[in-house]
Amino acid sequence: MTGRPRSRRGFLGLLGGMGVAAAIGVELPRLVAPSQPGQLLRSQILLPRPFQVPLPIPPVLVPRTDATTDYYDVTQRVATQEILPGVPTEIWGYEGRFPGPTIVSRSGRRTVVRHRNRLPVPTVVHLHGGHTPATSDGYPTDLILPAGTGYPTSRADAMAADPRAIRTHETRVYDYPLHQRAATLWYHDHRMDFNAPSIWRGLAGFHLVHDQEEQALPLPDGPRDIPLMITDRSFAADGSLHYPSIDPTLRHTPGVYDGYRQGVLGDVVVVNGAPWPTLEVDAVRYRFRILNASNARRYRLTLNPQPPGGSGLVQIGSDGGLLQRPVPHDAIDIAPAERFDVVIDFGRYRPGDRVTLLNLLGSGTTRHVMQFHVARSAPDDSHVPGQLARIEKLHPAQAGTTRDFLFRDGGDGGWEINGEPFSPTRISAAPRIDEVEIWRFTTDFHHPIHLHLVQFQILGRNDAEPGPYDSGWKDTIDLRPAEQAAVIVRFADYKGRFVFHCHNLEHEDMAMMANFEIV
């Protein structure tokens, strides 16, 4: 379906009732799902008490440099890490760490990362949120093959029939121009069919981009600017990571056992690789770059106790960088792959207070996330200004094309977009370079929908304005069951083939992904 909306009011009217669904030619899904998608996978080991482990801060990699470029070398390898106190756990990690080391870049300065695969399976690296040429975006069949192995089969006919796949042996160089705003990005595995278990085993890390606009602001920085990768995991009796893979080798048969196709939920909340950690803070403002790197779990984050007057989480940024103005929240809903940059002013508490970051969508062991110990008073010259950044607002009248996509259960153990499972050779949309389009999504279940290459703005949900967490530039939108939403996007700079998909990783592995090609 194509067309140019005549007005915002008229466009949002299409979102209500049966508008988008009728345009696609299907009934609006009637599935009502719980607020937490997926199936809980319980640990088989005695779990520690919360708030016993200090919060780890992932180390920052130091590059080789020249006049225009920063160069990094990263090795993906099997390692042993103590996640639960006193218990060794085998992980797959970038530089043998979970999370991987943080890469810090400057907007407009080229970053080149050479990845070496020392794992027993192929891998792919995607810079999530990166405005990246297709050859370095991490297309799911552009594999880095491990040394000394053949090509493992998984949906082998479809993959072998992808004549455009670029496969390398042992190493691959990813080239990131980074012509984009300052933002909290992350890098992770993106191998077709086995993305979920690979990330579950540890293949994820932060990539932070800075620019002059951000650095001119009096926001908390240095040791008071802290990335928080929130995940959930489960552990077997021997301390290994517990995951319901049909093929634990991750070489041949993709997928999870029956009961987990809606998503795998762990019972241990892990932040920066530690279970329910604690962080000692001064009674000052801190900036936290919060990433939900869980496979399927959604979080509703809040502080307990709230500071006097509430609004303890002041949002300053989203997936695509700084907001135009700060947005105060008592709680924030965050779906897999979303990022929220928030400022917490611990000066609103008293030294000695302990403040818990709670997950209001969790219960039992998943109710707590981490704890802050307000240790002492300290000077603080930071503040959150009322104006953060300049953001170009895209208007529906700029869009020459509107596209509709239905995300739903395809039966037979798979998930579909517009009635089709993923195929590397099927192109579902062909936007023209530098043109603006409106994409409308309809869902049957919880689906955090992620577009590669681009950032977008959310126009509305159902017959209403955007939600409370939809401000700024986004690359992932959290869609609830039987919900409809629309985004507006400009496909700029790079031609080529990219994907969009559900970032519930079990859904993605079970084919809820599609191609778009910029022409």
Image: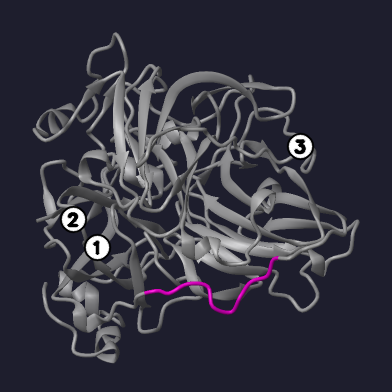
| Callouts 2 and 3 close, C-beta under 8 Å | no
Instruction: Work out whether residue 66 can be spotted.
Output: yes
Whole-percent x, y for residue 500 in the image = 27, 53
Amino acid identity at mark 1: Leu
Q: Which residues are magenta?
A: 382-391
Q: Which residue is mark 1?
A: 406
Locate residue 227 relative to residue 95 in the image: left or right. right
Q: Amino acid at mark 2?
A: Gly
Q: Position of residue 26 (x, y in %)?
A: 19, 68
358 on left or right of 230? right
Give the quarter of the image for residue 144. top left
- For label 2, count other residues whose C-alpha is less than 10 Å away and answer few (under 14), some (14-19) or many (20+): some
Residue 274: x and y in percent read 67, 37
Q: CA distance from mark 1 to mark 2?
A: 8 Å
Nearest the viewer among 145 and 443 is 145
Main secondary-structure element of the magenta-colored stretch: loop
Say which residue appears at 47% left-offset and 72% top-offset: 389
Residue 191 belongs to magenta span: no
- Judged left or right of residue 493, residue 259 is right
**Depth check: 109 or 88 in front?**
109
Tag in front: 2 or 3? 3
